[in-house]
Amino acid sequence: MIRISSLNKSFRTAGGAFAHVVRNLTLEVPEGCLYGLIGPGAAGKSVLLKMITGLLKPETGSIVVDGKDVTTLTDLDLQKLRLKFGMLFQNNALFDHLTVDDNIAFPLRRLYALPDEEVKARVEERLACVALSGFGGRMPGGLSGGQKKRVGVARATITNAPIVLYDEPAAGLDPVTSQKIFELLREEQRARNATVVMVSSDLDRLLTVTDRVGMMYRGELIFDGTTAEAKASTEPRVRQFVHGLTEGPL
């Protein structure tokens, strides 16, 4: 479970003022849940993901993961806790100079002392799961957008981490490829009973795979409920965003 309480985060602007990005946010993501985090641009969604992993520190509040408050851990303890996380970054963050095999194997080689045979077997297993068998020797520059996303998913899940964070996993993809990516992520989550937090602007497809949904607006969490409740919400901002209405308070 991820339990977030009274979280606040701000950044100093070019003019010297402080811009509040996350405001008094409280949220619980149940264990084994696929949680969709939605909202307009600059609502604080990606910042929240980075705070969950300890990449950014809040000014106030707590983030409890596996019974440990991320905001108070030492660097060493935070490094240990991060072994429980897998993450797909918005831009895939693949290493252009490494093959697909080496990109996927990177977390294993960096975090664990495993025999080369085991690393190779786990990479091949991940490639098969994302329907990219035989692609291991290719370079990222020769892959399509959808294939790069699949490589990113394989890398994010290769350590069998119980918690996985996805930041815009279908950004820039066509609708058909986007749906395939979301279905793949759902299959992976169910196979491992992982706790997943997924940020996406592709609501039509995101809402076909989520268990629960939270909506952020100007740094605040204005909705938290089941996917069905999100679709039926009468809160004006939630209703406008979920149903793509052009008139409303957003």
Image (cartoon, rainbow, N blue to C red):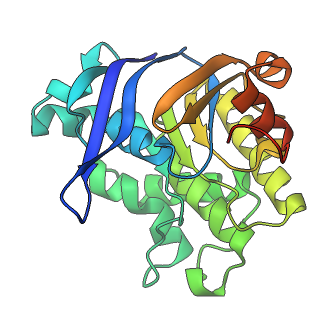
Give the residue displayed 48% in from the left and 29% down from the top: 220
Q: Is residue 156 above or below residue 25?
A: below
Q: How many marks?
A: 0
Q: Is residue 196 above or below residue 106?
A: above
Between 56 and 166, the one nearer to me in the picture: 56
Q: Is residue 109 visible?
A: yes
- Quarter occupied by residue 235: top right
Q: Is residue 219 above or below residue 244?
A: above
Give the residue displayed 53% in from the left and 69% down from the top: 101
Give the residue displayed 30% in from the left and 12% down from the top: 67
**In x, y percent, where is residue 145?**
70, 73
- Please state if 109 lies on the left or on the right of 35 as rendered: left
Between 106 and 215, the one nearer to me in the picture: 215
- Please state if 183 lies on the left or on the right of 113 as rendered: right
**In x, y percent, where is residue 96?**
47, 82
Q: Is residue 25 above or below residue 38?
A: above
**In x, y percent, where is residue 202?**
75, 50
**In x, y percent, where is residue 167?**
55, 50
Between 106 and 91, the one nearer to me in the picture: 91
- Image quadrant where one finds the C terminus: top right
Q: Is residue 64 visible?
A: no
Give the residue displayed 53% in from the left and 65% down from the top: 92
